[in-house]
Image: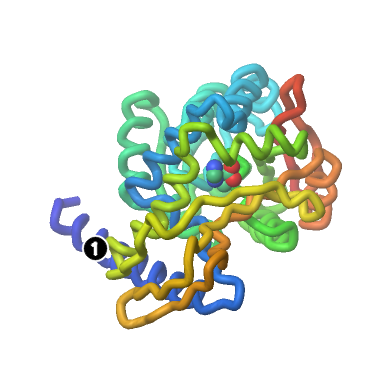
Amino acid sequence: MGRDHRSRGNSRIEAAALAAFRQDVIAGLSLPQKALPPKHFYDAAGSRLFERICRLAEYYPTRTELAITRAQAGAIARFAGRGGVLMEYGSGESLKTRLLLRAMQPSVYMPVDISEAALRLAVAKLRRAFPGLRIAPVAGDFSRPLDLPRFRGRDRRVVYFPGSTIGNLTPQEAQAFLRMTRGQVGPRGAMLVGVDLKKDANVLHAAYNDSRGVTASFNLNLLSRINRELGGDFDLRRFAHYAFYNAPLGRIEMHLVSLRAQRVNVGDHRFAFDRGETIHTENSYKYSVEEFQALAAESGFRGEKVWSDRRGLFSVHGLIAD
Ligand code: AVJ
């Protein structure tokens, strides 16, 4: 495959991604409660900021999930079964993925990611670390039904969805998503899902309001991205990061608060903000083990195993097609 072929493919995918981003932004800023989908946080700058979040003292999920995976790699591999097709929703650049690959030794590893650049980078690294592994990357949006290559069609399919990314979905959306995944893995399939747990609201608050302001920069970068890619004129000094735990709904909400009445242009579109009005940029749902297993049961899975840390901060669920 030549360079030209690749870059043509990329620019087509990137043009489509840009159009989708524009559409989401125009639609989201036109809502009575302005809202933007969190998947757009992750441009190059946003991905770097997210990596910094993952290393923050206050942000417990990443290191806790890694510790669980390290401590339980053998048990997780026994659950998933060796030699199956391992699909990951996400690019697979994490340390957790390597632990899982080493323990599970799948026949094929299929990372699915919306960012072709992230995918290419992760796959190059993995090929070096696992020279014998068959890797079949899929550039696409796993939140929609995907047409996946049918490698090793008779092998068991296991979807790995770490990082509590599922927390970005409402419980209703999460259920639909799990049901769709149940369709992807088939009757003998399984799923490994990382899920952040309900806990002391102060611990949650600190994780999304870190003392170094990295989460604030991550949130505000969404406005920079709109400025850069869609010709927006957001003044970042006139918006502030705001995150809180909404206990009745069991979720962290992130918002960007307009610090004054103002108008903002995005391309040819103009949006008015009252002082104190917010853009809702992210939900991060937290579940008890029982709540998540009940959700899985409503989606055609059986919650077979759950691995957690001693402090009960985070959980990794082993689900089996029911
Ligand atoms: C990647 C969605 C799991 O919800 O904790 C981190 C994203 N947002 N800090 C999360 C995030 C602010 C993260 N997820």
Name which quarter of the figure residue 8 lies in.
Answer: bottom left
Give the residue pinned by disc 1. Answer: 11
- Can residue 155 be seen by looking at this rendering? no
Who is closer to the viewer here, 268 or 312? 268
The quadrant of the rendered image in which ligand 1 is seen is top right
Q: Residues within 10 Å of mark 1 (few under 14, many from 20)?
A: few
Secondary element at tag 1: helix
- Residue 312 picture location, percent across and down: 76, 27
Q: Position of residue 313 (x, y in %)?
A: 72, 30
Instruction: Say which amino acid is labelled 1.
Output: Ser
How far across and how far down the image is residue 271, in percent?
Answer: 44, 78
Question: 9 or 156, which lies in front?
Answer: 9
- At x 49% / y 73%, what residue is drawn? 273
Residue at the (60%, 35%) spot, across then down: 207
Q: 93 above or below 242?
A: above
In the image, taking residue 181 as reference, residue 53 lies left or right, namely: left
Residue 108 percent location from the top left of the image: 48, 39
Q: Is 11 situated left or right of 247 in this image?
A: left
Q: Residue at x 74, y 62 (%)?
A: 172
- Asked if disc 1 is less than 8 Å from ligand 1, the answer is no
On the question of residue 260 being in view, the answer is yes
Q: How is the image coloured?
A: rainbow
- Whether 43 is drawn above or below 20: the answer is above
